Amino acid sequence: MVGESGCGKSTLGRCVLRLIEPTAGQVVFDGKDITMIPSAEMRKLRRRMQIIFQDPYASLNPRMTVGDTVGEPLEIHGLYKGGRDRRIRQLLDLCGLRAEAMNRYPHEFSGGQRQRICIARALAVEPEFIVCDEPVSALDVSIQSQILNLMMELQRELKLTYLFISHDLKVVKHVSSRVAVMYLGKVVELATSEQIYSEPQHPYTKALLSAIPVADPSIKKERIILQGDVPSPIHPPAGCYFHPRCPIARENCKGAFPPLEKHAVPSSDPVHVAACYYAGDSIIL
């Protein structure tokens, strides 16, 4: 899930886990609308759904040791009653931390190490699905790749599904198999990662991709500069939310928000959809 800051990515992730109660719509997990289930059943379901937050320091209790932090989910769900310490050491080792970290506190670790602790805590209850809310954006670039590689290794080894939230398209391309582009609370394009990067259809997606820097100085890349500020999400514009900043907007874009649907433009992805009346049209700079 990609988009500018403030577009609703983190809110969506929290709604999926019901950390924020949705005001409308459905959240379907494993064929069941989880917005309709009682809190007792939701508590059991939380074993299957976890989250990794953006700030690894703010999401850790400074008064709890690493062992207590990672072991807390085990205690809440009544797991590994006879071998919790062994399970905690196993989780720390899985995330690249030594066993002696159990008796230390969050402030004694670097940002990357703290995020490894957060990942270990998320894995403690053996989840199937993890919301990753910009898990590397607060880290140095050199550390980001280490954490991303760890997450991808864990995904393959433990057969995890991630909802990876980010504003960094380079990171998303490295991690995700499918990409949804969000603007002002609405998904405006959805496709495989390959199709998003090779055949973007929505003008907002094209603008985001044009902002990715190219390492080779000999390659000249046209940058699409969007005019104006992002509108208020509380009082969005009529019609397509993007039309006040869109370089190809026309009069009918002010009428109704376009449906998220497949268009006639060439795409090898059968479910490549975009919410744009003129999806695939060229943007003339």
Image (cartoon, rainbow, N blue to C red):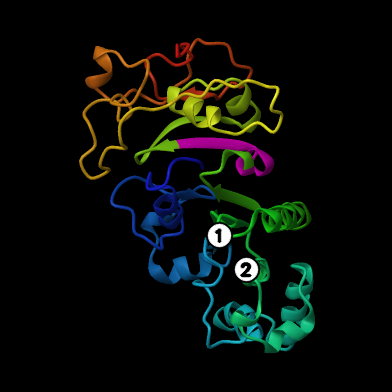
Is 106 colored magenta in this rendering?
no
In depth, the one of 30 and 256 nearer the eye is: 256
Dot 1 crowding, Cα within 10 Å, few <14, some 14–19, many 20+: some
The location of residue 232, given as percent across then percent down, is: 25, 42
* Residue bearing mark 2: 111
Would residue 44 be found to the left or right of residue 36 on screen? right
The location of residue 212, given as percent across then percent down, is: 58, 33
Say which residue appears at 20% left-offset and 40% top-offset. Answer: 235
Say which residue appears at 44% left-offset and 22% top-offset. Answer: 203
Compared with 27, 87 (above or below) is below
- First along the sequence among labels 2 and 1: 2
Say which residue appears at 43% left-offset and 26% top-offset. Answer: 225
Dividing the picture into quarters, in which one does residue 95 lie?
A: bottom right
User: Which disc, if any, is residue 138?
Assistant: 1
In depth, the one of 113 and 152 nearer the eye is: 113
Would residue 61 be found to the left or right of residue 86 on screen? left
User: For the image shown, how many numbered marks are present on the structure?
Assistant: 2
Please, which residue is most extreme toward the front here?
217
The location of residue 57, given as percent across then percent down, is: 54, 72
Amino acid type at mark 1: Ala
Magenta highlight range:
171-181
In depth, the one of 110 and 218 nearer the eye is: 218
Compared with 128, 99 (above or below) is below
